[in-house]
Image (cartoon, rainbow, N blue to C red):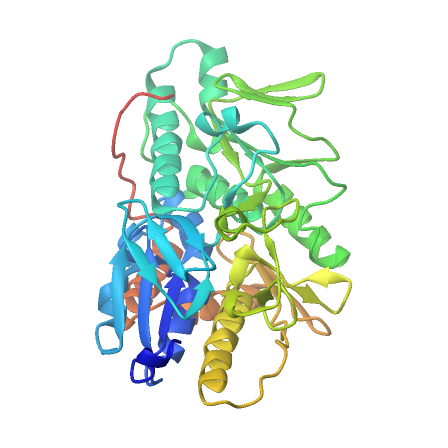
């Protein structure tokens, strides 16, 4: 800070109200700083449960909380709605899409990631990904519309395509989507239609690698695969999607006719590297040092999915919620130490495990030395997700929705919003 600013509180600007950004903001609640939180949306979203919005189990309001409501008791924090277009590292300002220039002394970039199509962005219109509420409600619309259109379709070939759902990508999101869609078809919608059998729906999970859940131990991945297969999901490994159209998906010479495609095959970080004028890695992430700083700039931190932070020298900190929260908390703590003139320590990531659910009564969890699968893993998965939700209302509503769906086999949010025409 300049000499004339000695009495002014240091300005901390946080970009993104995801897990990393919101954790950082809360950790600075009592710090002698002026915090400005900037996000393109007015809510914090619990992304791990987006697939349940997409498959009509939960409402968007159950997994999203207004940022202003969450931070309203923090008197040192302002909230701005805006889209970042550039960052001036010399002038220490963040420029928004409406022309506002927001000054900072410390900057935390936590702008997350979006789905990536590996050079085929034209596929997004026919195979939407799942990162935002709009994505989830659009996928829900397409899934429910497919059953509605199949009910009145007289051409058997077209009807089969309408009742075929393809998920591209066998990571946790793909696995969870596949299990949720097959349960929606075989349980929740079973008695709702008169001219089709929803249980005859075909759900195909495609993974380019040799097995699904590549980040999990092989035995847990095999358990997940066998569980999905018993549920009725078709798993296709070792084949990559070579084309996605409104008629279906191509796997080299093979073609699967399907009117509903869902993309879960990859992510790309936000344009933070471009804003900061630094080189990114192949996934668009910003390389950071042991203190989560860029290029030795000790006052700019990059956290969460936006950061390429080394872990155990051979891999990167995974793009999961607990990791983002740890990075956000670390950035806030480090800023506190810097302001007080104390020594800072490198970021030390503590891996809390990988989780993936496989339908309503089964899941797999990798804690490192401990592996859990089946019903107990599903209970732990549910408890962990409820714990990470923001606000008592959301926790209560999610538990009530899950209890209702578990007892009745019915999803409660089967609403088609927007156009009633398939793309």
**Residue nearer the viewer, 415 or 82:** 82
Residue in the image at 68% along x and 47% along y: 226
Q: In this rendering, would 182 be left or right of 392? A: right
Furthest residue in direction top, as rendered: 155
Furthest residue in direction front, as rendered: 3
**Residue nearer the viewer, 327 or 367:** 327
Q: In this rendering, would 61 be left or right of 353? A: left
Up-down relation of residue 417 to residue 132 (above or below): above
Q: Using the rendered view, name the quadrant where residue 42 is placed.
A: bottom left
Q: In this rendering, would 354 be left or right of 398? A: right
Residue in the image at 61% along x and 76% along y: 347
What x and y, as percent, mark residue 116? 55, 38
Residue 195 in view here = no
Q: How many marks?
A: 0
Q: In this rendering, would 176 be left or right of 290? A: left
Q: Quadrant of the N terminus?
A: bottom left
What x and y, as percent, mark residue 215? 69, 55
Residue 223 in view here = yes
Residue in the image at 25% along x and 34% along y: 417
What x and y, as percent, mark residue 49? 43, 55
Q: Quadrant of the C terminus?
A: top left
Q: Using the rendered view, name the quadrant where residue 70 is placed.
A: bottom left
What x and y, as percent, mark residue 375? 56, 64
């Amino acid at each position: 800070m300049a000499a004339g600013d000695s009495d002014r509180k240091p300005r901390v600007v946080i970009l993104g109200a995801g897990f990393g950004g919101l954790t950082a903001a809360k950790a600075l609640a009592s710090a002698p700083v002026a915090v400005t939180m900037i996000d393109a949306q007015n809510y914090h979203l619990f992304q791990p449960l987006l697939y349940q919005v997409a498959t009509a189990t939960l409402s968007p309001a159950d997994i999203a909380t207004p940022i202003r409501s969450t931070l309203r008791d923090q008197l040192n924090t302002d909230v701005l709605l805006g889209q970042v277009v550039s960052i001036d590292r010399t002038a220490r300002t963040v420029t928004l899409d409406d022309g506002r220039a927001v000054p900072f002394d410390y900057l935390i970039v936590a702008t997350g990631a979006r789905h990536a199509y590996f050079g085929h962005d034209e596929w997004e219109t026919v195979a939407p990904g799942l990162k935002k509420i709009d994505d989830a409600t659009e996928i829900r619309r397409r899934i429910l519309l497919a059953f509605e259109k199949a009910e009145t379709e007289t051409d058997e070939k077209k009807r089969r395509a309408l009742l075929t759902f393809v998920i591209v990508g066998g990571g946790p999101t793909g696995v969870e989507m596949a299990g949720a869609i097959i349960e929606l078809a075989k349980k929740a919608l079973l008695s709702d239609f008169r001219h089709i059998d929803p249980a005859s729906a075909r759900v195909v999970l495609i993974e380019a690698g040799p097995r699904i859940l590549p980040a999990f131990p092989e035995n847990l991945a095999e358990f997940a695969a066998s569980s999905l297969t018993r549920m009725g999901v078709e798993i296709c490994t070792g084949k990559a999607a070579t084309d996605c159209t409104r008629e279906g998906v191509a796997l080299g010479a093979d073609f699967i006719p399907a009117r509903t495609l869902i993309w879960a095959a990859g992510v790309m970080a936000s344009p933070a590297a471009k804003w900061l004028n630094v080189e990114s890695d192949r996934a668009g992430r910003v390389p950071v040092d042991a203190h989560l700083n860029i290029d030795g700039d000790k006052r700019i931190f990059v956290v969460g999915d936006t950061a390429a932070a080394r872990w155990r020298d051979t891999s990167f900190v995974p793009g999961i919620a607990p990791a983002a929260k740890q990075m956000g908390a670390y950035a806030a703590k480090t800023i506190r130490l810097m302001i007080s003139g104390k020594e800072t320590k490198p970021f030390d990531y503590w891996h809390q495990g990988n989780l993936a659910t496989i339908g309503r009564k089964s899941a797999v969890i990798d804690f490192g030395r401990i592996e859990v699968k089946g019903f107990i893993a599903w209970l732990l998965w549910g408890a962990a997700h409820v714990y990470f939700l923001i606000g008592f209302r959301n926790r209560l509503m999610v538990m009530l929705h899950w209890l209702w769906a578990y007892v009745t086999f019915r999803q409660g949010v089967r609403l088609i919003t927007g156009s009633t025409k398939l793309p």
